[in-house]
Amino acid sequence: QVQLVESGGGLVQAGDSLRLSCAVSGRTGLAFTVGWFRQAPGKEREFVGAIMWSGRSSYYADSVKGRATISADNAKNTVNLQVDSLKPEDTAVYYCAVRRASIRSMSPGDYVYWGQGTQVTVSS
């Protein structure tokens, strides 16, 4: 199976940029999708963005569009999420996840494998 480990979270200031990493191990395919989600206390887990494992395409939620960039390096088995111009509303636990398809999906239920999450806290 696929194993995922997020890293890079921490306490940052509003307006800063942050780069999160997702280390991917196990059996993957170029048609797989790696997604990023986040969940704040008392809120539903929400989609942030996703990229094909091949790195050929990516897409983002409206809440981070224009501020977030996802990159994939399948040779290094790593997917990164960079968020610029961080806002307090970005505070959440961030998760990476994998689904065995390249069809676009923003639904957490479509993603099979999940990491443990990394906390991002943005202060004003």
Image: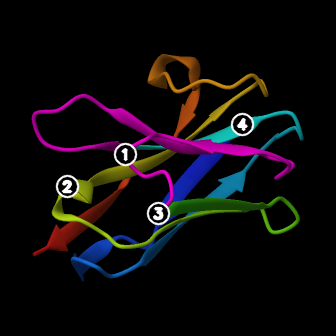
Please name the residue shown 35% across and 45% down the image: 38
Classify residue 19 as left or right of residue 111.
left
The picture places residue 13, in percent across and down from the top left corner, at: 21, 81
| Other-residue count near label 3 (Cα within 10 Å), few / some / many at <14 / 14–19 / ≥20 | some
Q: Residue 67 or 22: which is nearer the viewer? A: 67
Q: Which of 78 and 38 is in front in this view?
A: 38
Q: Name the residue under label 2.
A: 89
Q: Earlier in the sequence, mark 1 or mark 2?
A: 1
Q: Which secondary structure, mark 1?
A: loop
Mark in the foreground, 2 or 4: 2
* Circle 4: residue type: Thr
Q: Which amino acid does label 1 sit on?
A: Ser
Residue at the disc numbered 3: 67
Q: What residue is at 42 percent from the left and 52 percent from the top?
A: 64
Determine whether the residue tagged by mark 2 lies in a helix, strand or loop.
Answer: helix
Q: Are marks 2 and 4 in contact (CB under 8 Å)?
A: no
Q: How far apart are marks 1 and 2 (CA)?
A: 10 Å
At horizontal 17% and vertical 63% (from top left) the residue drawn is: 88
Image location of residue 95, percent across then percent down: 43, 47
Marks 1,2: beta carbons within 8 A: yes
Whether residue 16 appears in magenta in the rendering, the answer is: no
Which of marks 3 and 4 precedes in the sequence?
A: 4
Name the amino acid type tagged 2: Glu
